[in-house]
Image (cartoon, grey):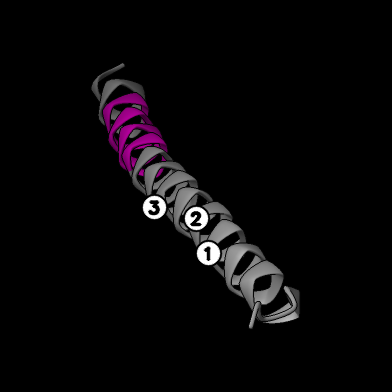
């Protein structure tokens, strides 16, 4: 009986660690997506300004 409790506790700790690691990775990926969206908007704005004909 004690052996199954130890195994169950170990499994629980492994699952908790996996969940925490996945949550951290998810947060990092969300931040990366936000950065890439801002970078894309910046590049598009810069290209739009370059394509504008210069007024004399």
Q: CA distance from mark 1 to mark 2?
A: 6 Å
What mark, if any, has residue 28 been given in the picture?
3
Residue 44, above or below 15: below
- Residue drawn at (68%, 75%) of the image: 47
Does the segment drawn in magenta span residue 9? yes
Image quarter hosting the C terminus:
bottom right
- Residue drawn at (66%, 81%) of the image: 54
Q: Position of residue 1 (x, y in %)?
A: 31, 16
Q: Position of residue 23 (x, y in %)?
A: 39, 38
- Lower position in the chain sequence, tag 3 or tag 1: 3
Q: CA distance from mark 3 to mark 1?
A: 21 Å
Q: Are marks 1 and 2 in contact (CB under 8 Å)?
A: yes
In this rendering, the label closer to the viewer, 1 or 2: 1
Which residue bears the numbered disc 2? 38
Does the segment drawn in magenta span residue 43? no
Q: Are marks 2 and 3 in contact (CB under 8 Å)?
A: no
Q: How many numbered discs? A: 3
Which class describes the residues within 10 Å of circle 3: few (<14), some (14-19), or many (20+)? few
What mark, if any, has residue 30 been given in the picture?
none
Look at the numbered disc 3 and give the secondary structure of its residue. Answer: helix
Residue 2, above or below 54: above
Q: Which one is in front, 18 or 43?
A: 43
Which residue bears the numbered disc 1? 42
In this rendering, the label closer to the viewer, 2 or 3: 2
Look at the numbered disc 1 and give the secondary structure of its residue. Answer: helix
Q: Which one is in front, 29 or 7?
A: 29
Q: Which one is in front, 20 or 27?
A: 27
The magenta segment is 8-20
Which class describes the residues within 10 Å of circle 2: few (<14), some (14-19), or many (20+)? few
Could you tell whether 25 is left or right of 1 in the image? right
């Amino acid at each position: 009986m004690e052996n199954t409790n130890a195994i169950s506790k170990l499994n629980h700790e492994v699952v908790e660690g996996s969940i925490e690691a996945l949550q951290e990775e998810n947060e990092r990926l969300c931040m990366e997506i936000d950065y890439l969206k801002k970078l894309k908007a910046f590049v598009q704005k810069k290209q739009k300004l370059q394509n504008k004909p210069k007024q004399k």
